[in-house]
Amino acid sequence: MKMFESVIDQIKKFKKIAVVTGAGISQESGIPTFRGKGGLWRNYDAMKLATIDAFYDNPKLVWEWYNERRKNIFQAQPNLGHKAITELEKYAEVTILTQNIDGLHQKSGSSKVLELHGSIVKIKCSVCDYKEEILTEIFELPPHCKCGNIFRPDVVWFGESLPQDVWQNAILFSSQCDLMIIVGTSLVVSPANTLPIYAKQNNAILIEINPESTEMSEGMDVVIRNTSAEVLPKLVSLFKN
């Protein structure tokens, strides 16, 4: 296939593959992105709602927004891009480093997923250490922990640090992989956008799949301006042959 011509001879040699995914792959399953046309919710800027300050100012409003996102996410199904990444596990050790909080990689059957920004199905107390998974809609808004304080979504909001154990594992795998596939992310959110740098330091091949150019397109070995659902099944087919 012409789009993979420069790396086709190396395909069978790749043993450790890191797949970095962002909102673009989920958008193909009908989940709107923060920065896209679906980025506004009612009259609120989604990027301003996803902060600890917004939560303390109006927890009910933030929970209403997250409940709407949860409904959308629970209805969404993995697309051909997610399924291709899952299939890739037949041919190499694959770790997914995702900025998405929707769980679609797990729903697709992928076994090793590092959720850099948390998960929308998990909630945690805003004060104590209690956490749980909620796979149905929450009716009492905002929900309260047994200790009496308010639950918050177990996601990383703007201005917050990533979970350190997850982040350290992401750096480790990025530093060890021989192929990194970067799918549907604009590579503007820090620190996730540094992962390709760790891979490059290990002389890994970098493949970017995104309909639009990104901050790091010039440093990629292969750049494909198309959607993951269109491209990833074709890439996986090269491992089969």
Image (cartoon, rainbow, N blue to C red):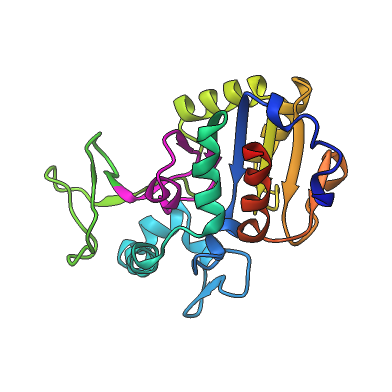
Establish if 204 lies above or below 142.
Answer: above
Q: Position of residue 71 (x, y in %)?
A: 33, 68
Task: Name the image quarter holding residue 81.
Answer: bottom right
| Residue furthest out toward the left | 146
Q: Position of residue 117 (x, y in %)?
A: 48, 44
What span is colored magenta in the figure? 96-122
Q: Position of residue 171 (x, y in %)?
A: 60, 25
Side (left or right) of 23 relative to 129: right
Residue at (58% x, 20% y) in the render: 172
Q: Position of residue 43 (x, y in %)?
A: 50, 80
Give the position of the C terminus as an image quadrant. Answer: top right
Taking depth in this image into account, of 7 and 136 the one nearest to the observer is 7
Taking depth in this image into account, of 12 and 86 the one nearest to the observer is 12
Task: Name the image quarter holding residue 200.
Answer: top right
Residue at (64% x, 19% y) in the render: 176
Establish if 190 lies above or below 136.
Answer: above
Q: Is residue 100 magenta?
A: yes
Using the rendered image of the protein, determine whether residue 175 is visible from the camera's viewpoint.
Answer: yes
Residue at (58% x, 57% y) in the render: 25
Establish if 96 lies above or below 47.
Answer: above
Using the rendered image of the protein, determine whether residue 191 is visible from the camera's viewpoint.
Answer: no
| Residue furthest out toward the bottom | 42
Residue at (22% x, 37% y) in the render: 130
Task: Name the image quarter holding residue 20.
Answer: top right
Side (left or right) of 120 relative to 144: right
Q: Is residue 11 magenta?
A: no
Side (left or right) of 121 relative to 173: left
Query: How many numbered badges does the structure rendering display?
Result: 0
